[in-house]
Amino acid sequence: MTSAVPSPVLVVGCGLIGTSVALALAERGAQVHLEDHDPRNVGVAAEAGAGTSDPVEAPELVVVATPPAAVVPAVEDALRRFPDAVVTDVASVKAAIVEAVDDPRFVGGHPMAGKERSGPAAGSGQLFEGRSWAIVPGERSASSAVDLLERTVVEIGAVPRRFGPRAHDEAVALVSHVPHLMANLTASLLDGAPDGHVDLAGQGLRDVTRIARSDADLWVDILGHNSSAITPLLTTLRDRLDTLIGAVGEDPSAVDGLLKQGRAGTTTIPGKHGDLPTDVTSVFVPIDDTPGELSRLFGDAAEVVNIEDLRIDHEVGRPVGLVEIVVLSGRADTLVEAMRAKGWSAYR
Amino acid sequence: MTSAVPSPVLVVGCGLIGTSVALALAERGAQVHLEDHDPRNVGVAAEAGAGTSDPVEAPELVVVATPPAAVVPAVEDALRRFPDAVVTDVASVKAAIVEAVDDPRFVGGHPMAGKERSGPAAGSGQLFEGRSWAIVPGERSASSAVDLLERTVVEIGAVPRRFGPRAHDEAVALVSHVPHLMANLTASLLDGAPDGHVDLAGQGLRDVTRIARSDADLWVDILGHNSSAITPLLTTLRDRLDTLIGAVGEDPSAVDGLLKQGRAGTTTIPGKHGDLPTDVTSVFVPIDDTPGELSRLFGDAAEVVNIEDLRIDHEVGRPVGLVEIVVLSGRADTLVEAMRAKGWSAYR
């Protein structure tokens, strides 16, 4: 256990996450072995440098990265085959799995990465850089097993976050599953909307509905496994929506209360570096849509300030874009002046 | 009427939008006169180059940019004082105003810009670059008045979109007001959530809830004026939410249907240049959070491909960011290879 990463490691299931874990560990010197019910996936992952299809004798760690429905049997199989190995999984819903397995050598895990792509060819050893990785021990998990998993997660660049199984499932319902459903519901109104109505859409609509583009099949699976955490939140939202329907146009103070509650909610979301959102201001710069303009813009801006965030607002119907550069409020005027001096039409 | 912009112009109300219209017209050679019930606003706008506080004799165009509740009396006052002028407004809800005024020289308007800031100091002549601007004639509006407004809007860089008053209000309910409320409701769940749950938040949650940060007071006003268009949409959403609550964990095919409806809705949103979303792929590049890194990244990327869109995903708890560069799918592999050759850890 003096090496930085466990070795050898067996990865069971060479989809996006499994292949990415394998690549991240292999890049850090681990001997990685790969299994998948489809040998083509192993071939693609091995070809990418994720490990070998040779059988493993005594892995220090087994990472089960199969689809959700196959996780429990795969974990139990691994615990049986390798009596000294620590076993973990990467499924996005945890309580049912952690309660079903209940073995000292098993610790549940869930990396917060990668939902928008799939397959071994999309794998990357950098996928977990800076991402949260939920560490979800069961009641009987050995502390040495938890330590091994946390250390491994840190080594591949992620940030371990310890959760109980039900708290984990409630947390992902809150920050991921329910927002996904709300984005989908909002977008569903656009399906069949009168011609021309979306011509008035701005960046706000694009932001709210972006995650609704994801693969529906994967989400049906995820949502089905976490309905007990999702349903109470949806019920709360339904009640608030009912209140809103009664209040819009009738009771401004009730509408105000709901809007302020939402605004307060946004302040709880961690910003850069895990801090609470700082005092930032947006500077807007229109650009021509020609190659190299963005590059020139960032070159000019980065000479003057540190860029906290940025967005490109696509302008409808014209070959022009509006770039929003978010900087610390005390630096906004400086940036505007500097950009204007370089010939840009910058404004706050 | 041979000049590109009307002149002289009177702008009534020197907030963000009024000042920005004045600046845009003044920059294009119009003689602009400014009025506001608060002389300090006129002072700030005039100081910025938006026009003069001198009284106007016979404006060709009057732009009423007061708060919503003051629009109708201000429009009627302008029609009385200036018997040859075309009069327009910029309020974000139109049916009640256009139906109340009903004069051949009045044409309603609504620029889709600027809601996240306020005040004359935030004004900019570039604010309307590439933005849609709804042109909303009443039943008796003269076509010459409509033409004048459309020509003016084009001159200051916006894209005129002709709407009937009720269609306009339904469209903004659909693409702006209701998405805003859904973002707020989603964010409201975070207010009072257990400690640590938001540690698992990713970029999706930030996107969905971003517009919920806006000023609540302004939104209470907007929503109150458009309740007749908003309420039916909220009721539809409530019914779909009820269906979803019954279906999650019980009826995967019903959940699948709702998700697919949302996904279909996202495809109706205009992308770049007003086209439907094209076939694009994201390339991910982790970067250190040091000044100049973004600039160097864009310089390297822009040598190889045209960047369709980009986002920075702030990594929680670590001084590192993940930049998502969206390019045409056929260019993604080229970009990944070129970036790796330059030392970046790029992946699809």
Image (spheres, coloured by chain):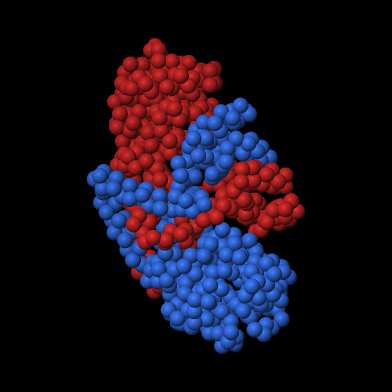
Chain colours: A red, B blue
**Residue A187, position in %: x, y?**
39, 53
B260 to the left or right of B200: left
Quadrant where the N terminus of chain B sits is: bottom right
- Placement of B96 over or under A245, stated as above or below: below
- Placement of A50 over or under A217, stated as above or below: above
**Residue B74, position in %: x, y?**
55, 82
Residue B220 in view in this figure? no
A314 to the left or right of A296: left
Which residue corresponds to the image point at 58% horizontal and 82% vertical from the top-left? Answer: B85
- Placement of A218 over or under A261, stated as above or below: above
Which residue corresponds to the image point at 59% horizontal and 62% vertical from the top-left? Answer: B157
**Residue B259, position in %: x, y?**
33, 47
Q: Residue furthest left?
A: B251
Most foreground residue, A321 or A138: A321
Which residue corresponds to the image point at 39% horizontal and 74% vertical from the top-left? Answer: A250
Q: Residue furthest right?
A: A341
Residue A35 in view in this figure? yes
- Placement of A79 over or under A183, stated as above or below: above
Most foreground residue, B183 or A103: B183
Most foreground residue, B203 or B258: B258
The quarter of the displayed image where residue A18 is located = top left
Which residue corresponds to the image point at 51% horizontal and 50% vertical from the top-left? Answer: B272
The quarter of the displayed image where residue B127 is located = bottom right
**Residue A301, position in %: x, y?**
69, 47
A37 to the left or right of B204: left
